[in-house]
Image: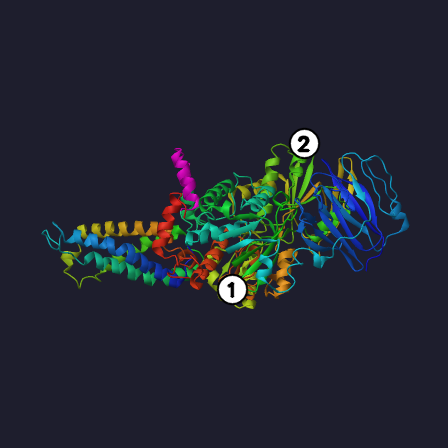
Amino acid sequence: MVPTLKGRWLTRILLFLWIGVPITFLFSLYVAGPGSPALPYIGWHYDLLPFQILSLILLVGLVMDPVYFYAQQFRWERDWPFAYFFFFSIIEFVIVLALVWWGVLDFTRSRSELHTSENYLLFTVHFGCVFILSFVAVLGLIQIFMIRWRFKSGEWGRM
Amino acid sequence: MIRFPILLDIYQRGDGPLKRVERISLPETGDYSIGRLSENQIVLDTPEVSKRHATLIVREDGIAVSDRGSTNRTYIGDTEVDISPWDGALPIRIAQFEIHLVAHTAASASETKVNVPQDNATRALASGTPAPAPAPRGQSIEVALNAPSAPDEMRFPRNVFKSEIVSASDIKSSEYFAGESTYLTVGAGLGSFVWADHLRIFGVSKNDIRAIGDDVTPYANYQRLCRNSQIPPHERLRSNSQSTPDNIWGFPGYASRETWKDLKEFRFGGLTHIFQVFGEASLAQTFTPRSGEVFKSIDSEAQRIGWREMFVAGRVLGIRKTNDERYAVAYRVPEDQARGGVRERIMIGKFLHISTGYPATRFTDDLQAFKARFPEEARVFNAYENHEVVYRSIEQNSMPATIVVRGRGIVASRIIQRLYEARSKNKNITIVHQMRNPIAKNEGYRYKRAQRYVYNHIENQAFNWPKGTWGGQLLRETDRASPEERLKIYEALGGTTTADRRDWRNIIQLGLGDGWYKPVFGHFETLELVKTDQGPKIQMRLKAQPNQPPVEVVADYVVDCTGLIGDISHSPLLRDLVETYKLPRTLGVGGGKVGGIFVTSDFEIAALRNGSGRTYAAGQITLGGPQPGVDTFLGMQYSALRSVDHLAILGAPNVSLFGPLRSFSQWIKWCTNTKP
């Protein structure tokens, strides 16, 4: 990948909309489903918690992007290897977990309800699903649909 | 001014070195025809020479050579010519013959008498040249002075292309008219192929596209260059996994395809290719595809899009605007397609694309001079020409042999690897690697905050430009820059580099340790041929830094790896186009030189706009333009996409806007090998 800062942001938003939101929707149904800590009964209810996590992942990413872009300026090729993308995605998730632990989501529900080991496991599985699909998308799925994406440093649209 | 008589030496290449077979003398101005038939003034009677092959045009102020649509073509040095002035610095090459200009200013009477054919199969009938007149046998060279042939203005396509804008109706009623096509690409090499591939996938029928060129195989020329520069099918190219001339999406790339192929045969080692793409440059060596695999993939895509039906065999000689907002393309078809002896054709197209590639191989001046002085000695080669004789001769015995490899690019690395392989047969091979100047670790090129890595006095880079120039920040910067700023970016990012390959480094390490690899720096002051006990050798005196004594090198062969000529004025077609329509050129790297043809960000040659007619260009001929890596697979994909997208916005027939759904459905067709 040879992204620019705008390209990084737009690709991140694209992955959020294409992959993050649909998967999170399924997770939110699961969280709200039978045995869920929030609403323990069957029915079409959902919980916003996975969406709150996903939004947090997006926000942390958007804030980190200028840092990556700055680091890229010291690379002769001005590229960002897939391995870096992989590694820093995990770092971003660790930051999200730390923020949750620190209490950024405490306004949504009580600490005892939020800070359970079941929830942290759920966050990790949720992140894993979104991340693996996003990585596959960056490796090639995006350009099947958006042929110009790879020449536009990760931005959408026409040339 | 030419002084008469003009003396020409005709050499013939047999199995061994060049042999002079004849010296001829041209007493006056005139057009001297060259060919196989006895009606020619200079008869070269071998099957490879066409019946009417070429004409030597001799005027008071100079000599020119013109090809007459021959099958095997006419060359000056290594440059194929249609018509070109000839100053004699390089020989004219026709099949296995070379014509050297002996002298035209210092011709003395004694020289004209030198006429000692080395075999009696030659016969000379030129006036002023005594004819030894032995019985002709097999091959003959005949010189006679008959009536000069037609002047230049009467010759095709000048006889039709009399003005900047030609009449379409005149062409349609002429004997040359060969049809019309909405989309017409000139060159029919990889650039044309990728462009036609985009058009087909964007919705254009194969009946509306024509590609005029020498060879139906789009990679024929590229493959020849690969083969000569020692990249056989199993060797890897310097190209990225997702640079896929057979697949406009770049997915799946060559790495995943190679892995998939390996996995199907239960070879799990293939997974390393995926890891290479994953960890590229930082954790793993950059993946590059095998040349043979790339060619196979192009064959399959050519089949899918109907390339064979779009291809028109012919050599393009000229292009003109027509008076109905289109373009007339004049070309000459091969002899076997002649219509009642006429091989000249003109096709009319609405949307034109020009991608004719590198015009010639380059020799540095000193080596060129050496070649001209000792034409019999096959000792100096360009890495891009066939030089198998070097490896054959040094591998056949264990005689000590020294090879000078000139240049620090990727080709030099590959030639050194080939010589290293030759060392398994002959341990006495020494490689002298000549580079212009040493480069210290911290002296790599700089651009803004980053610097290029140097190893063994050679700058390392995965591909021939930094990756960001193919679609990142660096592409954006070059695309938006003014011509002057562009030149600065080019100069900062360019330069000769090689790939950081572990096997190449090991070879250098090994060679430095054992003493059979020696880097030397500077330029050669003198190149001489010396006779030694082991046969003739080249003696060179190398001038390094001013404060150091010169270095003497005695070598058996020199392989010049300094590259190909990108200068478009070596191409008669482009030169005519540039002169006729005053096409703007880009600024060339390296001090005041001019570069390629100036194109817009959409790769359009704006100066060739003809009403609603459009002309685009791709490949090497656009060097110095909006994108640096124009002569690369990915660069051609980029320029094709830009120009076809531009056509879509103009509303060109059947070119879709190619949104996500069409893109996906076409990709499925690619995967299932279904026609687009």
- Residue farthest toward the front in the current orientation of the protein: B173
| Residue B426 vertical position relative to residue B378 in the rendered view, above or below | above
Task: Work out how far the residue at label 2 is from the one at label 1, CA to CA, in angstroms.
Answer: 56 Å
Q: Is residue B580 magenta-colored?
A: no
Give residue B395's quadrant in the image: top right
User: Can you identify the residue that label 2 sits on?
Assistant: B398
> Which circle's residue, 2 or 1, is located before the other in the chain?
2
Where residue B162 sits in the image (x, y, percent)? 65, 62
Pick out the residue farthest to the right.
Answer: B109
- Residue A5 image position (x, y, % from top left): 39, 63
Point out the image quarter for the C terminus of chain A: bottom left
Q: State whether residue B463 appears in this view.
A: no
Part of the protein shown in magenta: B252-272
**Residue closer to the observer: B302 or B413:** B302
Q: Nearer the viewer, residue B473 or B11?
A: B11
The x, y position of residue A39, in whole percent, is 11, 55
Q: Is residue A150 visible?
A: yes
Please identify the quarter of the rendering in which residue B413 is found: top right
Identify residue for label 1.
B600
Element on which disc 1 rests: loop
**Residue B173 x %, y %:** 59, 57
User: In front: B612, or B545?
Assistant: B612
Discs 2 and 1 share one subunit: yes
Count of numbered labels shown in the rendering: 2
